Image: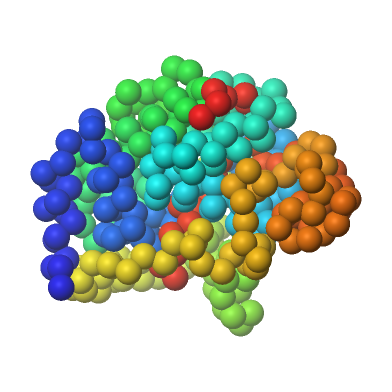
């Protein structure tokens, strides 16, 4: 059995400029699987705080009317490149699907860069605050380099070269753009409901409070969410730090329950990467894997012309612990 510091020692020997994906996988799938999922959920919420993003997501109706489908699609399309490799055949297919959906919209480079920055900065800050250990400098650099490469494959320009560059970009963008928007609030509410559904119904109020307790004041203000209060913040953050102390005494997670290899709720009969997400027009071939018939429903089973899918990559890596881009 590997001891708790096994992957930390392994990562210390790797080069973040060339071995960034291996370092990232060790962090995401073994040392911090739960933390990385929670951090990327929080990153998702941050993007809704920008009115131009929140209102666009509302107009697509995908995250308010087909929330579970979009949640599953996003988890799959992000997990596959990070599990199989960004330039593997399946990784390229997933990134190509992301780029096709983004290509339906006139999304600015600034918006794309901001969303990418949340994927880099929020996990690093989450682990700093709630992780069972601190990240090594090469681990921080590896997270940065993974998303730099993802951004390159998505055709994003002027990508920061360092974590510090991403942190400055995210903070300055939020200071300039965070504001209340009814669309962003509705999308945030729908996502919160989906997160609550992962737990028994009786736990939903607690999940709601806990979610708001880890949001900072600017984000709460952008949604006009009630502040959960000092006591709730103290209890939730104290519980997260207590969890970190418990995790520190346990061996690393070895068995990885990959989302893409399990029973995905939206696709009980399996999925094909090229048919994930939604399309501006009915999907070619009609039925897809779910046998929905020749009406264009495809994998989503929701009838013809659902409308375009989510234009931004967000959500979880997918591994469970519990614009127009370049063609990949």
- Compared to 106, does 217 lie above or below? below
> Residue 81 location, x and y as percent?
45, 44
Query: Residue at image x 19%, y 39%?
Result: 138
- Compared to 168, does 293 lie above or below? below
Task: Depth check: give the residue in front, 240 or 25.
Answer: 25
Query: Residue at image x 56%, y 69%?
Result: 263
Task: Depth check: give the residue in front, 124 or 282.
Answer: 282
> Does residue 219 appear anywhere in the picture?
no
> Does residue 99 appear anywhere in the picture?
yes
> Residue 318 location, x and y as percent?
48, 56
Taking the view exactly as shown, the residue that stands out farthest to the top is: 158
> Residue 282 location, x and y as percent?
82, 42
Task: Depth check: give the residue in front, 179 or 305.
Answer: 305
Query: Residue at image x 72%, y 29%?
Result: 104
Query: Residue at image x 17%, y 36%?
Result: 15
Name the image quarter holding the N terminus. Answer: bottom left
Describe residue 149's horizontal placement relative to residue 51 as left or right.
left
Q: Quadrant of residue 270?
A: bottom right
- Compared to 42, does 228 lie above or below? below
* Scheme of colours in the image: rainbow
Task: Depth check: give the residue in front, 84 or 280.
Answer: 84
Describe residue 42's horizontal placement relative to residue 107 as left or right.
left
């Amino acid at each position: 059995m590997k001891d708790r510091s096994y992957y930390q020692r392994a990562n210390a020997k790797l080069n973040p400029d060339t071995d960034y994906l291996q370092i990232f996988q060790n962090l995401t799938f073994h040392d911090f699987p739960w933390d990385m999922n929670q951090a990327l959920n929080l990153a998702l919420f941050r993007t809704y705080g920008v009115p131009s993003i929140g209102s666009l997501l509302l107009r697509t109706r995908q995250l308010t009317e087909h929330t579970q489908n979009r949640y599953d699609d996003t988890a799959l399309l992000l997990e596959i490149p990070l599990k199989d490799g960004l330039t593997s055949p399946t990784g390229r297919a997933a990134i190509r699907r992301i780029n096709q959906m983004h290509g339906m919209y006139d999304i600015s480079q600034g918006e794309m860069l901001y969303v990418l920055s949340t994927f880099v900065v929020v996990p690093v800050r989450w682990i700093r605050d709630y992780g069972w250990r601190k990240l090594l400098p090469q681990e921080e650099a590896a997270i940065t380099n993974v998303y730099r490469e993802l951004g390159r494959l998505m055709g994003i320009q002027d990508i920061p070269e360092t974590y510090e560059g991403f942190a400055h970009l995210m903070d300055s963008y939020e200071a300039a753009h965070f504001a209340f928007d009814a669309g962003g609030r509705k999308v945030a509410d729908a996502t919160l409901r989906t997160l609550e559904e992962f737990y028994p119904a009786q736990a939903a109020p607690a999940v709601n409070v806990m979610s708001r307790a880890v949001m900072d004041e600017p984000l709460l203000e952008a949604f006009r969410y009630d502040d959960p209060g000092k006591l709730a913040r103290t209890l939730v953050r104290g519980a997260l730090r207590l969890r970190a102390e418990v995790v520190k005494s346990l061996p690393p997670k070895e068995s990885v329950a990959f989302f893409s290899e399990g029973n995905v709720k939206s696709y009980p009969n399996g999925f094909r990467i090229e048919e994930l997400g939604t399309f501006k027009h009915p999907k070619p071939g009609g039925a897809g894997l779910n046998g929905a018939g020749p009406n264009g429903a495809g994998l989503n089973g929701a009838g013809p012309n659902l409308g375009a899918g989510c234009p931004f990559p967000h959500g979880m890596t997918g591994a469970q612990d519990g614009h127009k881009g370049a063609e990949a």
